[in-house]
Amino acid sequence: MDPSPDPLGHPAEHAATSLQQASGAAVSTLLKVMLDANTPASTKVRAADCILDHATARIELEDIEARVAELERAAEQSKSGRGT
């Protein structure tokens, strides 16, 4: 038995992969809503806001990942320097 199953009995990694794959369809749906001439303006604004929020969050996450990677490299170099 997998030590980290999701509530449906699937491994958590599988669930995360499924969500990541579905995100493309979600973005496509938001873009269609945003660009549809028959969509009310308030709904278009909400779709655009949602896209911008998620894009901003992704940029922030990438920045954090880069910072953590740099800190890990510096820590490893520090350990290597002390061991000699």
Image (cartoon, rainbow, N blue to C red):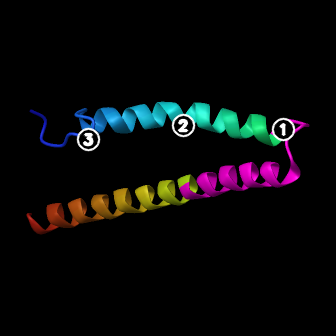
Left or right for 58, reference 11 = right
Q: Of tags 2 and 3, which is closer to the observer?
A: 3
Contact between labelled residues 3 and 1, with CB atoms less than 8 Å apart: no
Contact between labelled residues 3 and 2, with CB atoms less than 8 Å apart: no
Helix, strand or loop: magenta stretch: helix
Q: CA distance from mark 2 to mark 3?
A: 19 Å
Badge 3 crowding class, 10 Å Cα cut-off, few under 14, some 14 to 19, many 20 or more, is some
Instruction: Please state the extent of the stretch shown in magenta in the rendering.
Output: 35-57
Q: CA distance from mark 1 to mark 3?
A: 36 Å
Comes first in the chain, label 1 or label 3: 3
Identity of the residue drawn at 67% across and 49% down: 51
Residue 61 versus residue 82: which sits nearer the camera?
61
Q: Position of residue 60 (x, y in %)?
A: 53, 60
What amino acid type should be assigned to the residue bearing mark 3? Asp
Question: Which quadrant of the rendered structure holds the C terminus?
Answer: bottom left
Q: Position of residue 40 (x, y in %)?
A: 86, 47
Identity of the residue drawn at 49% across and 54% down: 62
